[in-house]
Structure formats: C-alpha cells, structure tokens
Image (cartoon, helix red, strand yellow):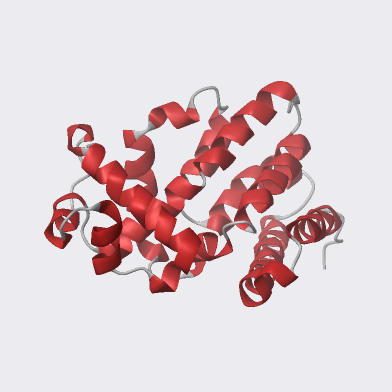
Amino acid sequence: MGRPPLDKKAVSQVSICLIQATQDLILTEGLESVTIRKIAQKSGLNSATLYKHFKDLDELLLFACVDLFKAYVFDLVQSSKLNNLSTPMDIYIVSWELFCRYAFQYSEGINHLFFSKHSHRLGYVVKTYYDLFPEQLEGMSDSLQTMVRTSSLYQRNMDVLRPIMQEKMSANHMQLINDLTVSYFRMLLNEKIDYKDKIDNDTQTKRMLRICKLLLTLPAP
C-alpha cells in the first residue's frame, strides 16, 4: 500500500529547509553527490529529521527537483497573460521554449525527474507538491495546469500537442510525433549533461524549437 498524501499541516519550515539544502547541494556539487549526511550538515538538522518529512533521500531529491522549476511555472503563467496565448500552437511552442530555458539550466534535475529509475515515483511527488503549493498555479489555464501536473513528459507533451493535431492526423501518427519530440529533447538534455558549459543553453533551446515545428509538418507514413 502506498503512502497517503502528506497533509498540508505537515509542511513546515523544516521541510522547506531540507528542500532548500538539497537544492543548494544539487547546484553546487551535482545531484549524484548529494547524501543524507550532506543535507543534514547543510540544513543544520540531524539525519533522522529527514525521515519525518520524506520517505527517503530519493523522494527528497524529487521534491527538490520539482521545486527547482517553480520559476518555470511562474514564467509560464506570466507568459500566458502577457502574450495572449490564444491558439494551441502558441501554447505548444511557448511551453517548450520556457521549459527548455530551465531544463538546460538544471539538466541533472530534469533528467532525474523524467528519465531516472526514480521517475515512477514522480506522480505522487508532483501531485503532493501542487496540493501543498497550489498558489504556484494561480492564473494558469486548465490546459496548462493539466500539463504541469502530469508526471510523464511524454503525456505532458501529448496534452498540448493533441489540440493542434487531433483533427489533422491519426492517433498513431500523433503518437509518433510525440515520441520523436520527447526523444529529441532527451538527446539534447544528455548532450548538456555530458558537456555542461561547453553546450550553450540558448542553442539547445533553438534546436528544440526547430524540431518541434518541423515534426508538426511530418507527413503521415
């Protein structure tokens, strides 16, 4: 039986402190170097405290990585207000552009969220995170909220791709475009992880946007 969702009352300054300490370690030492001992030292709390708020280190890492992207969610809300995202295509391109801006900046974190052996736990973490911090989604359209709350990157992309293509192509062709889009992003992300500062974030973002637009013109087999 899985763990019940955390009660909002359980979210305390201790939880925030642990998440922040974990984030700092991810950014300064790299995700693979983060340990419970280091989090305890960084936060000034003992190791046992972690297990009162999180199941284990892996769950805390997932929460810390989700929290890294709160600026992306804020920018997505602001962009939807300022740029009048009135068409599904507008939403699709802008959501990828903003996502890439943060994904390549925090490449280890996004890889851990969506492509690691712990990604199967992300559904619980994302649901709990936004249940605890719903204010981060204020002002966001229902379609964008659905995308942000979804734990699978393949499903996230499909949710914003479908309104563009559902009347123009078969479900199988749409699935092919979705798979190719996410696979190409994963390739770009791995390049960034492997080569770090040798890879320019803006260049990776432009490459991703080009493939997004190109794949939408791909003829059905």
In-front residue for pair 29/51: 29
Residue 44: horizontal and vertical position, in percent? 22, 53
Instruction: Give coordinates of residue 194: x percent, y percent.
Output: 63, 77
Is 164 placed above or below 83 here?
A: below
Query: At x 64% / y 27%, what residue is drawn?
Result: 78
From the viewer's perspective, is residue 22 above or below residue 195? above
Q: Quadrant of residue 164?
A: top right
Given residues 153 and 220, the one toward you in this image is: 153
Q: Residue furthest bottom?
A: 194
Residue 30: tell me if it is visible.
no
- Identify the residue at image location x=72%, y=55%: 170
Q: Position of residue 143 (x, y in %)?
A: 58, 34
| Side of 143 relative to 213 (left or right) | left
Q: Is 75 left or right of 168, judged from the image as shown?
A: left
At which x and y percent is residue 85?
73, 28
Q: Quadrant of the N terminus?
A: bottom left
- State whether residue 74 is above or below residue 201: above
- Residue at 42 percent of width and 73 percent of height: 32
Q: Nearer the viewer, residue 101 or 174?
A: 101
Query: In this orientation, which residue lies closer to the viewer: 55 or 43?
Result: 43
Let me know if residue 38 appears in the view: yes
